[in-house]
Image (spheres, helix red, strand yellow):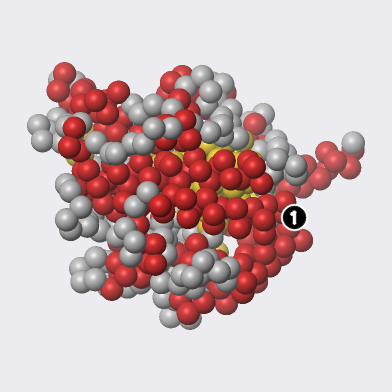
Amino acid sequence: MKKITLPSQSALNHANFTFGVATSSYQIEGDRAGRETCIWDTFCNQPDTIKDGSNGDIACDHIHRWQEDVELISELGVDAYRFSIAWGRVIKANGDINRSGLNFYIKLVDALSERGIQSHVTLYHWDLPQYLEDQGGWLNRETAYRFADYAAVIADALGSKVASIATLNEPFCSAYLGYEAGIHAPGPQADAGSRRKQGRQAAHHLLLAHGLALQALRQHFAQSNAPQLGVVLNFSPCHPLNSSPEDLDAAEFAHQYHNLWYLQPMLTGHYPSVYERLPVEDRPQIEPGDMALINQSLDFLGVNYYTRTVFRANQQHGFKDVPATGEGLTTMGWEVYAKGLTEILLSLDSEFDNLPPIFITENGIATADVCDNNEVNDAMRVDYFQSHLLAVHDAIQQGVDIRGYFAWSLMDNFEWAEGYTQRFGIVYVDYSTQRRTLKNSAKALQQLLLARQSRHHAVEDIC
Ligand code: FCB
């Protein structure tokens, strides 16, 4: 069986570097009866939205199997678990708190903490309650204020027990895939202006939601021990198809539009300069004071990385992505490109003076896994983790402040528009029995992490 190894002096071996696994609520929880309907329930019900016609009604049945899942996480030898909270499991349509929903997360965090595992919480991983969508969702400014109220409820219930709280996961996907491309929930909205305008407006309200929630969280924790507060964004180095000035310009346009659209306002209070290149009718409506609200200080930045993206010039939109071809692609059709992770980390580090410490909050690969006699030989995933952990190591060596790494994902789950056709887990899920089986990649990570743990304990004993 393949192993994962790290250079012996690597900062990734230090006790203060956090290793974890990640999931999100809609992708694993199931138990639709215990929460309000969310936009993904509605989206999945529409024809031709999800590749295998599935939905998250049951998913990994985590709400009923969470104790088994906590044992699994503990067995892996990780320091931390990153998960998200389903807004509609905690706040009812009438605004009341759903106590049993909130208690679920309190029990989960307590059980993790009893096993010495830190909780890293994401407040919004795309499952907007349908009752808010019915009022316009992210096209309605009011949603940002509701988000800050919800953040305060979570701070109150979980705040002192968790290691970190991230406001949003990948607002790029919520705004761009959800409204502009329309391949994620809620899908394009009729009569609300052009798709690009909708996407930019949703993005602006998500940014505002982030700012308002951070403000509410900081106020809440002013007198007490605060968890680390931040946000999780996705990044992909944008490369030109060839070195023509047009393609170089397209790649830079895409970099600003995809990679910097969220981070730059958060860190500087300004949109990237390509904002000025958008036709006036596509620009979002920005109220006075919004940019200052968005520009809150961050304790950490969560970086999600999967692959790079290649772009060519396109007259209508400024850029067009060129899908990867050739051998060695993942089942998502994505190129395995580990050095892109080092590249994007270095580029963010040089672009922003006030870049906060970084956690790699997602990194992983979908492969065609088969469970045969309780064995899943996912050698490609082991190689992927190996090369990407070394990419993180390289970035640290070159001066980037990186504090942790979370593998996506703890287990196979509902992969959005791809349904259950893509397996990103290090643990295999048989959806007909809900049986969990450690893949070889989980065993390789486990070996690395348990050896690391026993070295840390040995050091503690000497001290
Ligand atoms: C990220 C999402 C996560 C999962 C991975 C594969 O964009 O945050 O939920 O779908 O991609």
Please tell me which residue lies in front, 407 or 204.
Answer: 204
Q: Which residue is mark 1?
A: 116
In the displayed structure image, the side of residue 21 where residue 314 appears, left or right: left
Q: Is residue 421 above or below residue 311?
A: below
Q: Is residue 241 above or below residue 227?
A: above
Percent position (x, y) of residue 352? 47, 22
* Quarter residue 402 falls in: top right
In the displayed structure image, the side of residue 259 where residue 453 appears, left or right: right
In the displayed structure image, the side of residue 49 where residue 69 appears, left or right: right
Percent position (x, y) of residue 317? 15, 36
| Residue at the image position 42 percent from the left and 24 percent from the top | 347
Three-letter code for the amino acid on which mark 1 is drawn: Gly
Q: Is residue 379 above or below residue 360?
A: below
| Residue at the image position 35 percent from the left and 29 percent from the top | 271
How many marks the image carries: the answer is: 1
User: Given the current orientation, which residue lies at the most extreme left position?
Assistant: 315
In the displayed structure image, the side of residue 262 where residue 302 appears, left or right: right
Label 1 residue SS: loop
Q: Residues within 10 Å of mark 1 (few under 14, many from 20)?
A: some
* Quarter residue 431 falls in: bottom left
Percent position (x, y) of residue 183? 25, 56
Q: Quadrant of the C terminus?
A: top right
Please tell me which residue lies in front, 66 or 109.
Answer: 109
Q: Quadrant of the N terminus?
A: bottom right
The reply to whether residue 5 is in sight is: no
Percent position (x, y) of residue 104? 62, 70
| Residue at the image position 44 percent from the left and 49 percent from the top | 144
| Residue at the image position 20 percent from the left and 68 percent from the top | 48
The reply to whether residue 33 is in sight is: yes
Mark 1 residue CB less than 8 A from any atom of ligand 1: no
* Quarter residue 16 falls in: top right
